[in-house]
Amino acid sequence: MNLQLLHAGPCLTTYYDSHNDWLFADWQGDLTLPGVQAACLELTRCYQRNNYPRVLNSNALVTSISRDVTPWLAQEFVPVMEFTGVRQLAWVCAPALGGRYMAQEIANREPTRCLTLFSDLEEAVAWLQRTRTDYSSGCARPLRLPTTQARLDEAVQRLAQCIAAYEPARLAPTGR
């Protein structure tokens, strides 16, 4: 792999692998909802800047996942993915309890995309390499249509607003 750093955060480091022509999302540590929300917002900003039809999403270094992460991903983040242009997604499941469950929940909500779950990084890399589109014949990576780009921009803005609104609601007193 030839990795170019796109973003580094507390629970997600994102790279572009120019050798394999894919986005590599490398998650690590304890995944809490605020951390995942911030990371997902940065991830969608990567998609805003470039079209990445193939993604290697690794949770191999994830040690725990908060219970509220999966419902939030399914309800708020997965709908944004519709506009990103991702066609193949190799997802390496977290070894922590719940890692496979979370990945399967997301996969169930992504019926139109080729999302395949793996237990180890090497298998995921091999599968994604086999799906490689040959751009050497003069065909460039497909560009995102302007209307799709506009919809992605709107979806990212809504996601940012959702995250901003969600945090104060979580911290509000319950008023007994």
Image: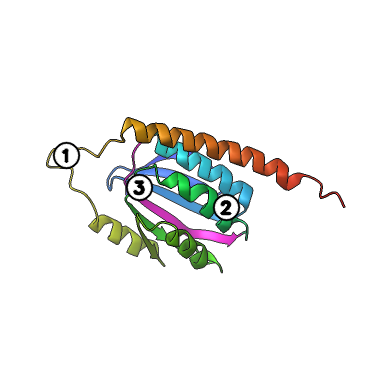
Magenta span includes 60: yes
Q: Decide if residue 128 is on the left or right side of residue 48.
A: left
Q: Which residue is mark 2?
A: 72
Image x and y of residue 85, in percent? 34, 43
Q: Tell me which segment is drawn in magenta.
A: 50-65
- Element under label 3? loop
- Element under label 2? helix
Q: Quadrant of residue 136?
A: top left
- Element under label 1? loop
Which class describes the residues within 10 Å of circle 3: few (<14), some (14-19), or many (20+)? some
Contact, mark 2 vs mark 1 (Cβ under 8 Å): no
| Residue sitting at x 46%, y 36% | 45
Q: Decide if residue 134 is on the left or right side of residue 77.
A: left
Which label sits on residue 139?
Answer: 1
Q: CA distance from mark 2 to mark 1?
A: 37 Å
Q: Residue furthest left?
A: 137
User: Which is nearer the N-term, disc 3 or disc 2?
Assistant: 2
The residue lying toward the viewer, choosing from 110 and 135, is: 110
Q: Quadrant of residue 127?
A: bottom left
